[in-house]
Image: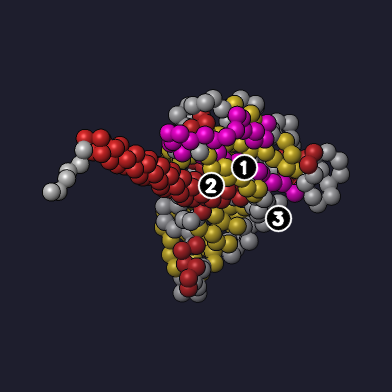
Amino acid sequence: MKKGFTLIELLVSMLIFSIVMTAVIAVFVTQHRKTIQVQNVSSLQTDAQVAFEVLKWDLMMAGFGLSPTNNIINAVDGGSDAPDEITIFGLALGYELQTTGFNIALNTQPVPANIITTNSWFGRDTVRNIKKGQYVYGINPESRELVPSLQGVMVDSVVFNSDSTLTLFLANNVSYLRGTILIGVNNPILLNNGVRYFLDANGVLWRNNVPFLENVEDIQFAYGIDGLNGAPDGEIDVNEWVNDLTGVNNDLIFGNKFAIRVTLIVRTRGIPGFDYGRNHIEVENRVINLTPFDRRFDRIILQGVVFPRNLNL
């Protein structure tokens, strides 16, 4: 006669099955959490890296086309308990540089007129020609100062000539020297207002009035100036890095090696069971104390040093 399972055997079997299933579910949940964590960090890292590269591009173009008499960088040091801010000035910065036009004046115009004859870029570089609707700025090739009459003058029309030159017809009369560097930009407001990077209370990094990157915990800047403490020697020493440019003369920035160090801290969404493992983060002169809640977030820290190459054309 076949014998069935006893009640005790069934209970033991169910207990073992429950233990095995609990272990399987625990492993599945753990792996699922780790998968989500990796996906979130990977996606966040990609977004942060792209934004970081654009930011560095802006920093590299700081002062483009300007001279020591112009405002170049407004640095706002947040101190030990707040993010930093920066406003960068130049004729063409990160986003804008892609559409900027560049030409050279081929003649001297001592008497004000609304026409400029320039070279013309042919082949693959035709996109670099100044275009109708752009605003032209002129840089004196000798003094490297902005030409007084050529600051944000609109181009009414452009004519390609048979002798491979270009004629710009402007909205206003201007005078200039042969060899004047002409820069055509789409947004003349940048010269006066610059590009401002700042972090709001919601962890959003802004580029002027446009949200630039979310989930940002902090942004810090430091400025290295060769010759800030002692005679210039071609290198930026440790004691020549500062967190604020207040009182630093533009001539010192233009005349010597100058660098900007930028640090960006981006954090993921909260991860149940995750522990960041640190009670505080120190970046430049900022100290971020982490609460138990803050330690639930993983972080990506990006840092780079940029040497603005166009502080003086």
Answer whether residue 60 is visible to the viewer in this image.
yes
Q: CA distance from mark 2 to mark 1?
A: 9 Å
For image coordinates 86% across by 41% down, the residue present is 230
**Tag 1 secondary structure:** strand
Q: Are marks 2 and 1 in contact (CB under 8 Å)?
A: yes
Mark 3 or 2, which is nearer the eye? 2
Mark 1 or 3 closer to N-term? Answer: 3
Q: Is residue 113 above or below residue 19?
A: below
Name the amino acid, label 2: Phe
x and y percentages locating residue 80 in the rendered image: 65, 26
Q: Check residue 52 in the rendering and tell me which mark sits there, or answer none.
A: 2
226 horizontally vs 40: left or right: right
Name the amino acid, label 1: Val
Quarter residue 192 falls in? top right
Q: CA distance from mark 3 to mark 2?
A: 35 Å
Name the amino acid, label 3: Glu
Is 289 contained in the magenta span?
A: no
x and y percentages locating residue 18 in the rendered image: 30, 38
Mark 1 residue crowding within 10 angstroms, few (<14) / some (14–19) / many (20+): many
**Of residues 136 and 71, which is closer to you in this image?**
71
- From which residue to which does the magenta span run? 256-285
Mark 3 residue crowding within 10 angstroms, few (<14) / some (14–19) / many (20+): few
**Residue ID for mark 3:** 142
Answer whether residue 112 is visible to the viewer in this image.
no
